[in-house]
Image (cartoon, helix red, strand yellow):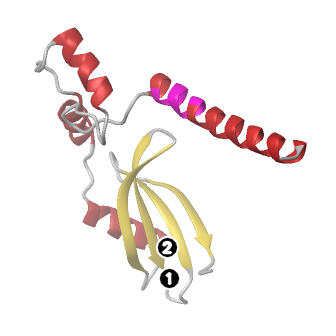
Amino acid sequence: MNIMMVLRKRNVVLFVTGGILIVAVLVSVIGRPTNMTGSTIGNNSNQNYIMMYTYGSNITGSVPVGPTITKTIESQVHVSLANASNIAEKAVGANAHTTAVRIGVVYGFVVYKTLVVDSSNGCHDILVDAGNGKVLATAQRSWF
């Protein structure tokens, strides 16, 4: 075996070991994703074992994060999806039609993101405020 083959094998081993180390550090720093009940997603038996050893096998708090956040946001959204679609169509003009609309977050604000086609088949992105129905932004885009 020549020196070049030995160096290549060593580099591969170092690369793989470094990759595993990076993934291990990221998982320990960031943690595993959790679902709405707080359970980890995917195979994470080691972390579950540590949690069970430290806190017991089952805890139930009184303030679940997911439903609490959902209720808070729902109390602030006063515009329906259908109304947001109508508002976006009016912002584009006569004979405009919404082809897609969904609720989302832009720059930390809850908005309806709408895609509207105008009477000459031009495509427009319209952001409608989910709280008060005001058009926050419009942008014409190409189909391609």
Residue at the spot 38% in from the left edge and 33% down from the top edge: 32
Q: Main secondary structure of the magenta part?
A: helix
What label sits on residue 118 in the rendered view? Answer: 1
Q: Nearer the viewer, residue 103 or 1?
A: 1
Start and end of the magenta stretch? Answer: 21-27
Q: Is residue 1 above or below residue 93?
A: above
Q: Is residue 23 magenta?
A: yes
Q: Earlier in the sequence, mark 1 or mark 2?
A: 2
Q: Is residue 93 above or below residue 42?
A: below
Residue 86 pos. (x, y %): 33, 69
Q: Pointer 1 and pointer 2: residues touching (CB < 8 Å)?
A: yes
Q: Is residue 105 left or right of residue 13?
A: left
Q: Tell me the element at label 2.
A: helix
**Residue receiving disc 2:** 92
Residue 97 pos. (x, y %): 40, 80
Q: Nearer the viewer, residue 66 or 103?
A: 66
